[in-house]
Image: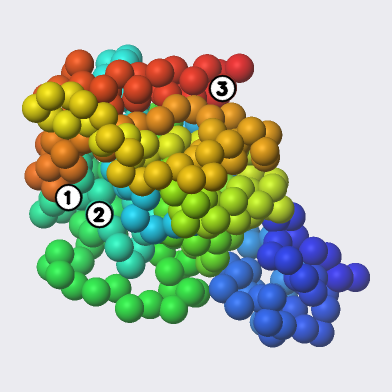
Amino acid sequence: MSTVPENAPNHCPGTGSEDAGKASACAGCPNQNICASGVATGPDPAIELIKSRLSNVKHKILVLSGKGGVGKSTVTSLLGHMLAKQNPNMNVGILDADICGPSQPRVLGVRGELVHNSGSGWSPVYVTDNLSLMSIGFLLGSPDDAVIWRGPKKNGMIKQFLSEVDWGDLDYLLIDTPPGTSDEHLSLVQYLAEGARCVVVSTPQELALLDVRKELAFCRKVGLPVLGVVENMALFVCPNCQAQSEIFPASTGGSSQMCSELGVPLLGALPLEPLLARAADRGEDFIAARPTSPAVTALTDIVKKITASCES
């Protein structure tokens, strides 16, 4: 009997089919090698291992976009810092799942740190007492090293991160993803199986919204609940006079109009602040440096909505 695993890619032939692991729809699927071997009887056994490893993680949130350059990594780092600051007793982890473009070590100011391996697995790098990070950037010989891997190897790395990192007890695990709706995203959804939700990041212009709509369609197809959309770089805020300008014109109504059309919550809009961009480049904590800035004010409201949705 041909069994189609839950959250399988579109047109999956099923584990019992003669085409299992060989069809074009199987390319990049984390179960491909198992299915092709002819011994597959169900989902990848790693799913149960990952479920056990992450059993102490209360909330798993993927940060998605579909479009590159919208500030997904910056938004992830800001969410992590804000969640950790709002409650010192809350533990927050960030997994940098962008295998080919890991930027979290730099954004969070822990570039050059080493990951320690013990009997309990890899220990994440601590940014603050209650904010930790795991990234392939810690495993490279040099920050300039390129990761030139095909899909199956990237999927294997994601599986390793999910199954071998010893996060301890976490209230929130934020997963920074690469652009698109391909291998890494399918792997994360399949391995996390259930309990994961997502935040989608966009910018106001139609060029970005085109790809974000595809990301939202991906979430619907794989059954990934969407907490809401964050519109990044909504307005430019002059650091001198605080005047606001529209750098990326919302010619079609921006994220607000898109969310209204698709029935998705709009969590809020983050302004484009030059000092925030500089802080990300330098690995500085922007929230601590400028707690009254327009971006931090907007971020506070966004995080409140996310935590309220997660706890409800």
Which amino acid, by three-letter code, is at mark 1? Arg
Q: Which residue is drawn at 40% across and 18% down?
A: 301
Q: Mark 2 points at which residue?
A: 103
Amino acid marked by disc 3: Ser
Q: Where is residue 41 in the image (x, y as percent from the top left)?
A: 76, 67
Residue 274 screen position, x and y as percent? 16, 39
Pointers 2 and 1 in contact (C-beta within 8 Å): yes
The amino acid pointed to by label 2 is Ser
Question: Tag 3's secondary structure?
Answer: helix
Front-most of 250 and 72? 250
Give the left or right position of residue 4, taking residue 153 as reference: right
Q: Residue at x 66, y 52 (%)?
A: 217
Residue 226 found in image quarter? top right
Q: Distance between the residues labelled 2 and 1?
A: 6 Å
Say which mark, if any, is on residue 309: 3
On residue 106, the disc is 1
Separation of disc 3 and disc 2 at Cα?
A: 28 Å
Q: Residue at x 33, y 78 (%)?
A: 148
Q: Where is residue 211 in the image (x, y as percent from the top left)?
A: 53, 57
Q: Is residue 139 shown above or below 107?
A: below
Asked whether residue 27 appears in the rendered view, the answer is yes
Q: In this view, does 147 lie above or below 55?
A: below
Residue density around tag 1, few if under 14, some if 14–19, many if 20 or more, within 10 Å: some
As displayed, is residue 122 above or below residue 265?
Answer: below
User: Are there few (<14), some (14-19), or many (20+) residues within 10 Å of tag 3?
Assistant: few
Q: In which quarter of the image is residue 291?
A: top left
Quadrant occupied by the N terminus = bottom right
290 displayed left or right of 56: left
